[in-house]
Amino acid sequence: MIVNSAMSIINAYLRLVERWRWSLLLALLIGTFLLQPLWSSTRLGELANVTLYLLVFGGAVHAGRIGATHTTGVIALLVMALVLQILNTLGIAGLDGPLLGLMLVIVVSALIATFAELVGSREMTADSLVGAIFGFFMIATAWALLYLRLEDWQAGSFRIPEGGDLDTQLLYFSLVTITTVGYGDITPATPIAQILSALEAAIGTLYIAILIGRIVGQLKFGEKRAELQSERSPMPLTGQRSTQENNDAP
């Protein structure tokens, strides 16, 4: 009964993704960003947070362009991540590292599916632009998970103010780095962390300049082409008849 109810909810969610596509996924991802600081202090809050992330990543794979075999593999990874998070919520120790690595693999798979859909589309639309913005935030999410993995592997990789949630702080650092804001309250402390941070800033800049710039340019070109076609369209038959009648008149 529980399994059937869960499948019904998932199917309803996927239908919403098929209808609203990147707009829905972008809204869910930003909503998850905003909710993360509010409920990350409790185990149930962490479970809800990871569940929302998994819904976003699974929706991205469903909306993106990826093969059926890869989709099945990503679904299996999503289920494994959810099971690990539930076990972690129940207090089983030693699962943070495997869960973090698994989430990173899932995010990269969702990124590949998203970019394959955007790059493979012949015609760019407003939905494509929203998808590109969603991909931008997905890159920030992937880098935040990479920073978490690095901090877990080598503690002290980042100079972080005390008293905050590590997940939220490194997500914040990833967002201000990819946008090249760089407030300076969190800084990379080791060579690996410094190189990764510089790479994220460079990728964020190139992403906006190349992919988003390309989509915006094609949208403007499509608008101009539509205007030219409307200007070159033949006159209506009624207008043609009126012109002919005027020419025949003495």
Image (cartoon, rainbow, N blue to C red):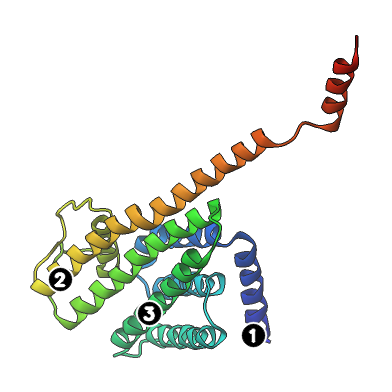
Q: What residue is disc 2 on?
A: 193
Distance Cα–Cα, label 3 vs label 1: 25 Å
Residue drawn at x 53%, y 64% as measured from the top left: 121
Q: Nearer the viewer, mark 1 or mark 2?
A: 2
In terms of depth relative to the viewer, which is nearer, 90 or 2?
2
70 in relation to 145, above or below = below
Residue 229 in percent (x, y) is at 64, 40
Q: Which quadrant would residue 249 be assigned to in this image?
A: top right
Please tell me which of labels 1 and 2 falls first in the chain: 1
102 in relation to 112, above or below = below
Q: How many marks?
A: 3
Q: What residue is disc 1 on?
A: 2
Q: Which mark is residue 103?
A: 3
Q: Is residue 156 visible?
A: no
Residue 197 in percent (x, y) is at 19, 65
Residue drawn at x 52%, y 78% as measured from the top left: 66
Q: Which quarter shows the C terminus?
A: top right
Distance Cα–Cα, label 1 vs label 2: 44 Å
- Residue type beneath disc 1: Ile
Question: What crowding class fits label 2: few (fewer than 14 Cα within 10 Å), some (14-19), or many (20 or more)?
Answer: many
Distance Cα–Cα, label 3 vs label 2: 19 Å
Q: Is residue 190 left or right of residue 226?
A: left
111 in relation to 68, above or below = above
- Residue type beneath disc 3: Met
Q: Which mark is residue 96?
A: none
Most extreme residue toward the top is: 250
Please tell me which of labels 3 and 2 falls first in the chain: 3
Question: What crowding class fits label 1: few (fewer than 14 Cα within 10 Å), some (14-19), or many (20 or more)?
Answer: few
Q: Is residue 186 left or right of residue 50?
A: left
Q: Which quadrant would residue 243 be assigned to in this image?
A: top right
Marks 3,1: beta carbons within 8 A? no
